[in-house]
Image (spheres, rainbow, N blue to C red):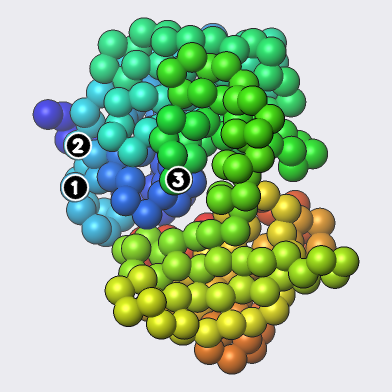
Amino acid sequence: MDKYNLKLDYQFALAQSMTDGMADCRYFLWVPDWREDAEEKEYLVILNTGDRINKEFEIVYQFKAEYTSKKCCFAISKDGKTAVAGYAAKKGIICYDCESGEVLWNNPQIKKIDKVRFNNFDENIIEVLNNKQEFTYLDKQTGAVLEADRAKKVRQIINWMRASKNGNYLMTSDYLSGKDKANYTVYDTETKEIKGRFVAQSHVGDSSFDVTNDGGLAVCAAYQKQGVSLIKVSTGEVLWTQKGLTKVTSVCFDKMDEKILV
């Protein structure tokens, strides 16, 4: 297989952000050429073969797909075989077979797409987030919008749970009715013991909080509220807050817990 060396931090962060921090995902979808005048671009499916940014990565699939100069977002399945692209223009959501580049389905009815991703708990579901922080849920096989009852159950699951990258810790959130706050709890997934509880700003949409691999720190973001905060899980102490970041829809620690990706 071809090798590719991702030398720059921002390239790695860009590729990782397209997987939305899925704990057990080894594949990244990357578009190396970001010239906005192209109607078609080459997509690379990259297998992460190392645990550091400067190690080599394997290119397992290459295919060309449509592109728009307006906002375009991407996601890839955990097995690296299926990719979806969301186009803010007229194309809607397109699902691709990564090996052949074949279009599996296209749902042009989905508009105002801000983010698209595979559900962390059920890969047969694709989540689409618009700029008003509203979710639409699609069937991975057909691209059809899920019925209201099933979509409601999906949202209840994904909104309140986040696992650390190594899967050893789980962070859950319960919204406090009538208040702009939420209860957060961090569990050790092996012993089921509680590592800590704290109250912080509530969030809109999932992926607006994350926990480190040692379960000691948490990062929370409240959309259009008080920015991004780093919190000590055991005591609830706020170590710092970056108030300048007010339109954050996703925060996560990188694999080595040395950076926070926003």
Whether 30 is drawn above or below 242: the answer is above
Q: Amino acid at mark 3?
A: Asn
Whether 257 is drawn above or below 30: the answer is below
Near-viewer residue (62 or 197): 197
Q: Amino acid at mark 2?
A: Glu
Label 3: few (<14), some (14–19) or many (≥20) C-alpha neighbours in 10 Å: many
Label 2: few (<14), some (14–19) or many (≥20) C-alpha neighbours in 10 Å: some
Q: Position of residue 232 (x, y in %)?
A: 56, 85
Q: Position of residue 26 (x, y in %)?
A: 28, 45
Closer to the camera: disc 3 or disc 1? Answer: 3
Q: Which residue is mark 2?
A: 58
Mark 2 falls on what kind of element?
Answer: strand
Near-viewer residue (91 or 157): 157
Near-viewer residue (179 or 115): 179
Check the picture and name the quadrant holding the N terminus: top left
Whether 116 is drawn above or below 174: the answer is above
Label 1: few (<14), some (14–19) or many (≥20) C-alpha neighbours in 10 Å: few
Going from N to C along the chain, the mark reached first, 3 or 1, is: 1
Mark 1 falls on what kind of element?
Answer: loop
Mark 3 falls on what kind of element?
Answer: loop
Q: CA distance from mark 3 to mark 1?
A: 21 Å
Closer to the camera: disc 3 or disc 2? Answer: 3
Going from N to C along the chain, the mark reached first, 2 or 1, is: 1
Indicate the quadrant where residue 177 lies: bottom right
Check the picture and name the quadrant holding the C terminus: bottom right
Q: Is residue 26 visible?
A: yes
Q: Which residue is mark 1?
A: 49
Q: CA distance from mark 3 to mark 2?
A: 23 Å
- Left or right: residue 57 compared with residue 109: left
Q: Which residue is mark 3?
A: 120
For image coordinates 85% across by 69% down, the residue present is: 179
For image coordinates 19% across by 37% down, the residue present is: 58
